[in-house]
Image (cartoon, rainbow, N blue to C red):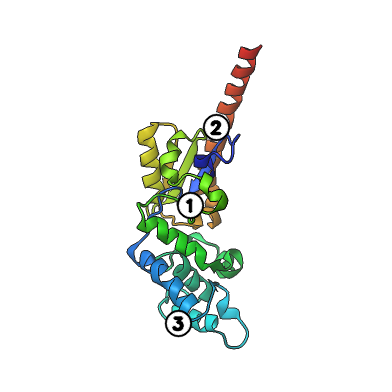
Amino acid sequence: MALAAKTVTGITSCISNSIALTPRLHNWSEFKITYVPTILEGLLDIPYVSPLWSESPGFSRGKMLSKLVSLFHRECDVPACHMLSMMWGTGWPALYHHKNLHEVTHRRGGDLYGGTMMSYHRHVAKMVKGNGDASPMFPEDGPYKQLPKNYMRAAKDIETPVLFMTGKDNKVFTNSNIVCYEKLNQERPGFHQLHVFPEYGHQDVFMGKDNDKDIFPRLLNFLEEKRDAAIILMEESVLTNV
């Protein structure tokens, strides 16, 4: 969004995982973000959701909700993992493949992610139910008036090359980054790049036990490629000015 709105400059390259400017969701995820915030805030007086609710002391509404969610997730015995699937996507699990994680990482999910306010879900729901492009939540409020009403339409003028990446089995934002890349590639063929990692999902591309072999070399190659290109352009500019 910042690149499209030109509120940041001087960025040599950018890597965008899973979602950029064209959010796409599974049908069940869309249903959840449409109705669950109202149910939690309006009926249960719960302002946020947390993967750590199962560890809350005593009795709480959050703890009861965690136990309810775990009834529908029998793929593992980690309540935080179950809550993360409920919070973020559609799948058993939704955020990653269990096989891609070290077990210690899997069991620390509640510590690694934390709670999420309902405002996030409402913003995503607004974009998905609109025309499917990224937009401000409150476009007419204060400083937001200066921002693009539709970031995707402004993105054709982005001057920073972006590597759009996603796991092939993304159960959070499905093919969002593929759609974004294809739209931008029509405007400026070959300027941005896309890489889909097989047998990976939404978050295991950063937290997987084999990322050093499966993921990071591709990211590093992109960063080095664009760094070298930027250095060459800078040197040519200096020579021209001299």
Residue at numbered disc 3: 68
Bin the neighbour count of mark 1 within 10 Å (Cα to Cα): few under 14, some 14-19, many 20 and up: some
Indicate whether 97 appears above or below 22. below
Find out whether the residues at labels 1 and 3 contact each other: C-beta distance under 8 Å. no
Three-letter amino acid code of the residue under disc 3: Leu
Cα gap from disc 1 to disc 3, whole angstroms: 37 Å
Three-letter amino acid code of the residue under disc 1: Pro
Q: Where does the image place residue 103, in percent across and percent down from the top left?
A: 55, 67
Cα gap from disc 1 to disc 2, whole angstroms: 33 Å
Three-letter amino acid code of the residue under disc 2: Lys
Residue 11 position by quadrant: top right
Q: Where does the image place residue 121, in percent across and percent down from the top left?
A: 46, 64
Residue at numbered disc 1: 139
Residue at numbered disc 2: 226
Determine the secondary structure under disc 3: helix
In the rendered structure, find residue 124 and report the number of the disc placed on it: none
Q: Nearer the viewer, mark 1 or mark 2?
A: 1
Indicate whether 67 appears above or below 18. below
Determine the secondary structure under disc 2: helix
